[in-house]
Image (cartoon, rainbow, N blue to C red):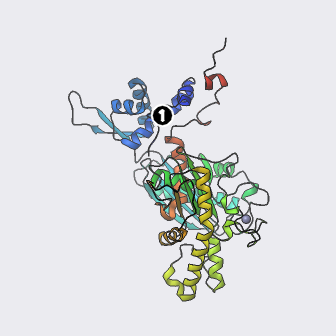
Amino acid sequence: MRTKAGSPSPQQVAIGNNPERSRAHNRRVVLDVVRAHGPLGRTRIARLAQLTPQAVANIVDELASEQMLIEVGRLRSGRGQPPIQFAVNPNGPMTAGVEVAADHITTVILDLAGQVRASRVSPLDDSRPQQVAAILPRELSLMRKTIPDWAGKLLGVGVVMPGPFEIEGMTSVGPTTLPGWGEVDATKLITRSTSEVVIIENDATAAAVGERLFGAGRHLSNFLMIYFGAGLGLGIIHDGQPLRGAFGNAGEIGHVVVAPRGRPCPCGQNGCLERYSSVQALREKLAEVGIDATAGIDIDIDSLGVEGQSAFAEWIEEAAAHLAPMVAMLENIFDPETIVFGGSLSDATIDAIIARLAPLPRSVSSRRIRALPRVIRGQTGNLTAALGAAALPLLETFTPKLDLAAGPVPTPEEAFHVVRS
Ligand SMILES: [Zn+2]
């Protein structure tokens, strides 16, 4: 992961006025530097983090005592006493990610080095809030037991589910949302049932975070992710951070009308993008030729038979036709480095959709010289959303940023260096 730790912005200087915020921020910078460049000695950390050696020494001691960093020996080059090298501790605190889908629940445990240490998919008979809250502690405890030499400390649990959240008439409707979640405070409910720090996110944003930390977005600061869950969502990474909007619903492209007077949608409109370019639309297309694809969304094309394969090809055509103008529109709005396609479809299916997008309509991205294609496939595969969920607490732990979690909101005086006269 690349960060801007080396080039403090005016805002980063501004938060230095508040010791608590500054301390939390510096911890993140140090962790991020070690994670991205480690193993490193204290002097190198100080140079890369642009912090004083004394500040780094204190933070490194603190992080080591919390098992976040470990000593990995001394560097055998150079003159004088070789410096002790530090790395993130792969058996230290970890994070859990949970994807709640309509018919199953996927759980992963991720260590600080970003390695998946355990993963588990369990069928879900009932995806309503109380039922999910009841089985989550069991899932987490089963996962803990599978990792040897681990004390079991979690930095947090990221939980993802399909949005949109708390929109009257849009939540809890249709087959692509989960029933009952619109009426509960999901964070409070799951925090109480797991006794962990819980972060709830929509699946597309979490998937984008997953790609940012472990996949196609590792070296990108500005990219979009079109996520095929049961519905269709957009994750937005802006300056290395997810863009959520005021209510956590930014990127809800599934219910953008792309075909006026088109197919009716459970949301009450006609011609929503999700009615054409989603796994649910694929299921309906296959159902027309008598194929029941409700059990698994990772569909094996070879097993579909002639009729099924032609229905599948028709869906690819239709999905791509409706996505291509959306891609160009998103490029014109966000000017991203690239757009990543990913989610609960096989790599071959996503590649087929991307191939059928061509020729894409012109946009600000139609440059002859580009580092990346306009659309690429994600790299984190079917675990994308759960992995992204587990990455949420990691992002909170690692990424230097100006956020409210680090302490009280700065006063205008702190934020803008206003000198009282
Ligand atoms: Zn709709």
Q: Is residue 2 left or right of residue 129?
A: left
> How many numbered discs, if any?
1
379 vs 262, nearest the viewer: 262
- The structure residue drawn at horizontal position 39% and vertical position 33%, both measured from the top left corner, is 48
Image quadrant assignment for residue 58: top left
Residue 333, image x, y percentages: 62, 51
Q: Is residue 229 left or right of residue 165?
A: left
| Residue holding disc 1 | 27
Q: Is residue 89 visible?
A: yes
Task: Specify the amino acid type for callout 1.
Answer: Arg
Vertically, is 407 above or below 282? above
Label 1 element class: helix
Residue 113, image x, y percentages: 41, 48
Q: Is residue 88 visible?
A: no
Image quadrant assignment for residue 344: bottom right
Vertically, is 330 above or below 413? below
Residue 184, image x, y percentages: 74, 54
Ligand 1: image quarter: bottom right
- The structure residue drawn at horizontal position 75% and vertical position 68%, both measured from the top left corner, is 260
103 vs 66, nearest the viewer: 103
